[in-house]
């Protein structure tokens, strides 16, 4: 049998091991604590990827409309400048005022569409996030975990407890498909003296300058 000196030496070695390798003392039982990366989950699920792709497509299409309109307006502005010598001051002022009105109206409409696009996709992403608690509870029951922590806020953890990949699989299998927003990108440019259908003439205002 080991003598007292040997037992003390073994106890000292164990204490040193706990200090050097603290995981030996704090290891959790399987299924006790699970972690997932909420940021990665909401980025990698199919619903989020579909929304991101659709938003990029619609944003690019709207930007193309803006670029095309800017080119059209620049060409008309140059044309008006060339006509200055052939128009009376009154005629020129009327033409310039009408051009400014149509430019302001188009840009206001484009800004409204851009804002609607952004709001609609924010709402669509919120619906994706709303499905998260049910998915995580299913993951907790499936693994027998007592609690699920957000890996993005955990300083250190055994990666074997990271169940983000499984959470993505469950989300894709259980969550409803995303609602892809539909935004009208038809933004016609009005011709001289033309009014939008069903609208009253747009009065000049200092706020539109």
Image (spheres, rainbow, N blue to C red):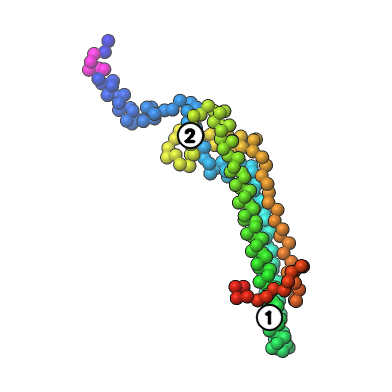
**Of the residues under marks 2 and 1, which one precedes in the sequence?**
1
Q: Is residue 189 left or right of residue 19?
A: right
Name the residue located 68 percent from the left edge and 46 percent from the top edge. 179
The crowd level at tag 2 (other Cα within 10 Å; few <14, some 14-19, many 20+) is few
Residue 19 in the image, given as x and y percentages of width and height: 32, 30
Q: Measured along the vertical axis of the image, is residue 195 above or below residue 11?
A: below
Q: Quadrant of residue 113?
A: bottom right
Quadrant hosting residue 157: top left
Instruction: Label the magenta part by its dominant secondary structure.
Output: helix
* Residue reaching furthest to the front: 200
The residue that label 1 is drawn on is 96
Q: Position of residue 129 (x, y in %)?
A: 58, 43
Q: Does the magenta segment cover residue 6?
A: yes
The label shown at residue 2 is none
Q: Nearer the viewer, residue 178 or 205?
A: 205
Residue closer to the observer: 149 or 76: 149
Q: Which mark is residue 159?
A: 2
């Amino acid at each position: 049998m080991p003598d007292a000196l040997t037992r003390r030496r073994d106890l000292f070695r164990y204490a040193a091991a706990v200090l050097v390798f603290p995981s030996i003392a704090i290891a959790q039982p399987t299924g006790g604590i699970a972690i997932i990366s909420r940021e990665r989950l909401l980025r990698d699920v199919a619903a989020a990827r579909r929304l991101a792709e659709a938003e990029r497509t619609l944003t690019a299409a709207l930007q193309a409309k803006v670029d095309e309109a800017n080119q059209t307006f620049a060409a008309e502005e140059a044309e008006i400048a060339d006509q200055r010598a052939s128009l009376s001051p009154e005629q020129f002022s009327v033409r310039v005022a009408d051009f400014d009105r149509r430019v302001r109206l188009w840009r206001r409409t484009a800004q409204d569409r851009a804002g609607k696009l952004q709001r609609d996709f924010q709402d669509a992403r919120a619906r994706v996030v709303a499905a998260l608690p049910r998915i995580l509870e299913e993951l907790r029951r499936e693994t027998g975990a007592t609690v699920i922590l957000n890996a993005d806020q955990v300083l250190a953890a055994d990666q074997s407890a990271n169940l983000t990949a499984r959470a993505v699989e469950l989300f894709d299998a259980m969550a409803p498909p995303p609602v892809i927003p539909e935004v009208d990108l038809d933004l016609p440019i009005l011709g001289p003296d033309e009014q939008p259908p069903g609208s009253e003439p747009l009065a000049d205002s200092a706020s539109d300058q």
